[in-house]
Image (cartoon, helix red, strand yellow):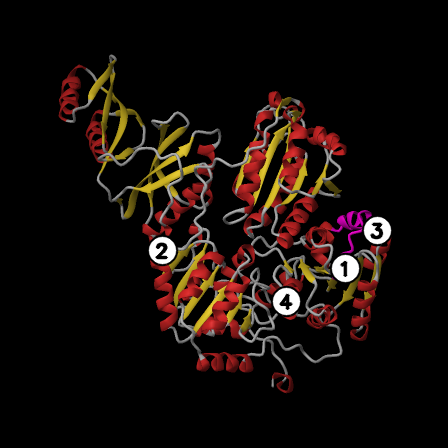
């Protein structure tokens, strides 16, 4: 769990059926119940008809518990995990278009190098930096590049995965041990 | 077997044991209608407005426990269902709705009578489907019935484009559903059950809060066993009324905004709340931060998202009430709470919320009490929403499960006419009394024609105060009697109206006529209506104003001689 201006952030992953409208069901539930999503990433999983989603959400433990329960309540959602306090790898990809010229180009390249980011496009008066990492790293690079003039930023949102071998798809619904779920 | 989509729908409904459908045709659903003559086992009741179909399916679902079925055409047909679907969703009523949709090629083109039905109903259904291939119809309907009737029940909608009805495909009805994301937890967690047993053993002032879940899970005997074995007083929520007999010694009645004062006070004084299949609705809790602060809470509920949503819970148990209570009953030790039960008797003496004022005037409370006597508490009472609903909840003696049918969470005025129709169709063996408000009744009274047409003998008691009574009461209490838009200066003549529809109509203006009118209506072979012209500015007491606490309770200002 990280905090941002006092509001705790949680990372939640969900395994969902890859059906039309599933994203709408999920976003509609979040909207209706007033839950805040700070980022959402969706993509195919290792199974052809299942997708994985990573949510970074804002709220205290009580709110996040409600979010996970309501997510789980959706019929197309197979599994939900709040992995905030677990041993996870989390990454985000960003493309940052920065104003540059002959004088500033090398300085930008130095910064990009320090962040182990890449320059993927160079134009006369701008260049595009590709960076991946956790949210904080991307925020830091973005802040550093601001002094040169950031023209455009595109971020994918965080994706996250547990370390170790415990994340294989189970086709049957995992019985959730609600009995131990505290109601906070 | 090769069938077209319409035949598939009918075959699937038959396999799910459907006997009756409430509906109204239109272009997109016409192929389905034209197939109905091939399936005489499916009784179709033609309503006058789709809202009537949805509420009727809801009433049918509530009295039978089986999913009620409503269907309608695309566009306005589907949107007219919306109030009824939302009502079923809020009160966990099993229901399957089928809507026609414009043909596949037209979807998204703003075609005639096109609306995004699955989009509109997404937040008010348990789940919904847009079936884009005829071959998928059986699976969608199988899943719809399964989802609607298991776990925490709710409405499931299946939207079918017109050309999906007409196309042919191979029909095969699945034996099982394949829903990896849907697997309701039924057995309570053993460690939590043990914790609950410990809290119950330690409690000196326990109360059971009995909700709708008991009725859904048919756990009446189990609740009774728990209450009697450990001598725990039972408070029933509005939708929990009937889950425990009103005339049982341990029954304390309904709590909350218009509940019995002593029930709300008992919750306040309790040291343990055992909440069964209920959701701590704001009409029960008032201000949640000050609700039942002196008690530990055990919450047994099949929907995990209801646990910890409104109120902090000490022992959460997710599961089916019948199974969890059986386990609990096996483990709890017999006990008595003599002092506590005496204390509740004191509260009942000190706050006689259910006394009916001694007056010569015609007041609604008296009418409901007379209805209870005349039917011996054996009728099914259906209500609308507002003052009459609260009086019906307070003054009728409910002795059987599924005997109060009312729109609780959604508070949908107009439920009283079609809801009663569905209840009577589901239980033709029962006397169904619709206690109606003159406001709500006029919202859906077109269904009187449906009642007469199908000889569905619902009896109506219109509590006619020429006001939107509950709103007027709020204006009296909280807006210095500024009655804005709540008075009807020209209500229709309900007796003539009844006659125009082909029903019996009786007007009662005098207390002395009440009982004979009730008897006459019940003796009449067919639907009947009694227009009770009551005191206009009668208030529902007690009242805990919205968002406040039991300490802000307003009780009826009774003269001293009655107060005793």
Task: Name the element at disc 2.
Answer: loop
Q: Is residue A176 above or below residue B546?
A: above
Residue B65 image offset from top left, x and y in percent: 60, 52
Image mark 4: chain: B
Are discs 1 and 2 less than 8 Å apart at CB?
no
B441 relative to B218 in the view: left or right:
right
Are discs 4 and 2 less than 8 Å apart at CB?
no
Image mark 3: chain: B
Disc on the earlier residue, 3 or 1: 1
- Structural distance between the alpha carbons of marks 1 and 2: 45 Å
Viewer-proximal residue among B539 and B123: B123
Callout 1: 10 Å neighbours few (<14), some, many (20+)? Answer: many
Quarter location, residue B8 = top right
Task: Name the element at disc 4.
Answer: loop
Disc on the earlier residue, 1 or 4: 4
Are discs 3 and 1 less than 8 Å apart at CB?
no
Residue on which disc 4 sits: B398
Same chain for labels 1 and 4? Say yes or no.
yes
Q: Is residue A89 above or below residue B324?
A: above
Residue B544 image offset from top left, x and y in percent: 53, 68
Quarter location, residue B534 = bottom right
Image mark 1: chain: B
Q: Is residue B51 above or below residue B359?
A: above
Q: What range of the chain is rendered magenta?
A: B445-461
Are discs 4 and 3 less than 8 Å apart at CB?
no
Residue on which disc 2 sits: A183
Residue on which disc 1 sits: B459
């Amino acid at each position: 769990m990280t905090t941002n201006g006092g509001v705790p952030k949680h990372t939640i992953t969900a395994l969902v059926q890859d059906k039309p409208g599933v994203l709408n069901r999920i976003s509609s539930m979040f909207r209706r119940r007033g839950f805040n999503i700070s980022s959402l990433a969706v993509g195919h999983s290792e199974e052809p008809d299942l997708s994985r989603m990573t949510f970074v959400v804002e709220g205290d433990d009580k709110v996040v518990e409600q979010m996970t329960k309501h997510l789980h309540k959706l019929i197309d959602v197979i599994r939900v995990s709040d992995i905030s306090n677990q041993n996870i790898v989390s990454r985000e990809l960003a493309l940052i278009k920065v104003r540059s010229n002959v004088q500033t180009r090398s300085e930008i390249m130095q910064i990009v190098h320090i962040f182990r980011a890449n320059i993927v496009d160079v134009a006369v008066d701008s260049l595009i930096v590709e960076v991946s990492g956790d949210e904080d790293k991307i925020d830091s690079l973005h802040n550093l590049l601001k002094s040169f003039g950031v023209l455009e930023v595109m971020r994918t949102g965080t994706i996250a995965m547990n370390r170790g071998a415990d994340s294989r798809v189970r086709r049957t619904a995992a019985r959730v041990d609600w009995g131990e779920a505290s109601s906070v | 077997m090769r069938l077209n989509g319409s035949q598939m729908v009918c075959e699937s409904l038959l396999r799910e044991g459907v006997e009756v459908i409430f509906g109204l045709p239109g272009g997109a659903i016409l192929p389905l209608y034209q197939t109905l003559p091939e399936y005489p086992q499916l009784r179709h009741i033609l309503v006058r407005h789709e809202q009537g179909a949805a509420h009727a399916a809801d009433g049918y679902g509530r009295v039978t426990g089986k999913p009620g079925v409503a269907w309608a055409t695309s566009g306005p047909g589907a949107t007219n269902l919306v109030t009824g679907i939302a009502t079923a969703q809020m009160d966990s009523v099993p229901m399957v709705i089928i809507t026609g949709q414009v043909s596949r090629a037209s979807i998204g083109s703003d075609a005639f009578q096109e609306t995004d039905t699955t989009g509109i109903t997404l937040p008010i259904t348990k789940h919904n489907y847009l079936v884009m291939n005829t071959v998928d119809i059986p699976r969608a309907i199988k899943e719809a019935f399964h989802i609607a009737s298991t776990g925490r029940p709710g409405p499931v909608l299946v939207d079918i484009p017109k050309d999906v009805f007409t196309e042919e495909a191979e029909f095969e009805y699945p034996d099982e559903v394949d829903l990896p994301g849907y697997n309701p937890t039924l057995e309570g967690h053993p460690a939590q059950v043990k914790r609950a047993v410990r809290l119950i053993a330690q409690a000196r002032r326990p109360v059971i809060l009995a909700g709708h879940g008991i009725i859904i899970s048919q756990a009446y005997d189990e609740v009774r066993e728990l209450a009697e074995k450990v001598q725990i007083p039972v408070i029933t929520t509005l939708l929990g009324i009937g889950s425990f007999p009103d005339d049982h010694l341990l029954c304390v009645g309904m709590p909350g905004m218009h509940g019995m004062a002593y029930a709300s006070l008992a919750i306040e004084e309790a040291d343990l709340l055992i909440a069964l299949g209920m959701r701590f609705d704001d009409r029960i809790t008032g201000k949640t931060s000050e609700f039942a602060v002196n008690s530990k809470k055990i919450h047994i509920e099949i929907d995990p998202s209801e646990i910890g949503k409104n109120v902090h819970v000490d022992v959460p148990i997710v599961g089916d009430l019948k199974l969890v209570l059986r386990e609990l009953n096996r483990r709890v030790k017999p006990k008595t709470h003599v002092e506590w039960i005496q204390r509740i008797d004191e509260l009942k003496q000190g706050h006689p919320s259910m006394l009916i004022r001694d007056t010569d005037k015609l007041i609604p409370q008296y009418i409901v009490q007379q209805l209870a006597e005349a039917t011996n508490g054996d009728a099914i009472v259906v209500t609308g929403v507002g003052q009459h609903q609260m009086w019906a909840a307070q003054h009728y003696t409910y002795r059987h499960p599924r005997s109060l049918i009312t729109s609780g969470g959604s508070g949908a005025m107009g439920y009283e006419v079609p809801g009663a129709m569905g209840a009577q169709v589901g239980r033709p063996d029962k006397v169904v009394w619709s206690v109606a408000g003159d406001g709500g009744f006029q919202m859906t009274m077109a269904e009187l024609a449906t009642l007469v047409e199908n000889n569905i003998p619902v009896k109506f008691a219109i509590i006619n105060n020429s006001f939107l009574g509950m709103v007027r009461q709020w204006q009296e209490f909280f807006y210095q009697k500024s009655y804005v838009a709540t008075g009807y200066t020209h209500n229709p003549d309900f007796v003539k109206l009844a006659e125009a529809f082909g029903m019996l109509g009786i007007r009662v203006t005098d207390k002395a006529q009440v009982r004979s009118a009730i008897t006459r209506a019940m003796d009449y072979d067919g639907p009947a209506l009694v227009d009770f012209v009551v005191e206009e500015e009668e208030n529902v007491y007690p009242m805990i104003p919205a968002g406040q606490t039991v300490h802000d309770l307003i009780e009826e200002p009774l003269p001293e001689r009655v107060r005793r």
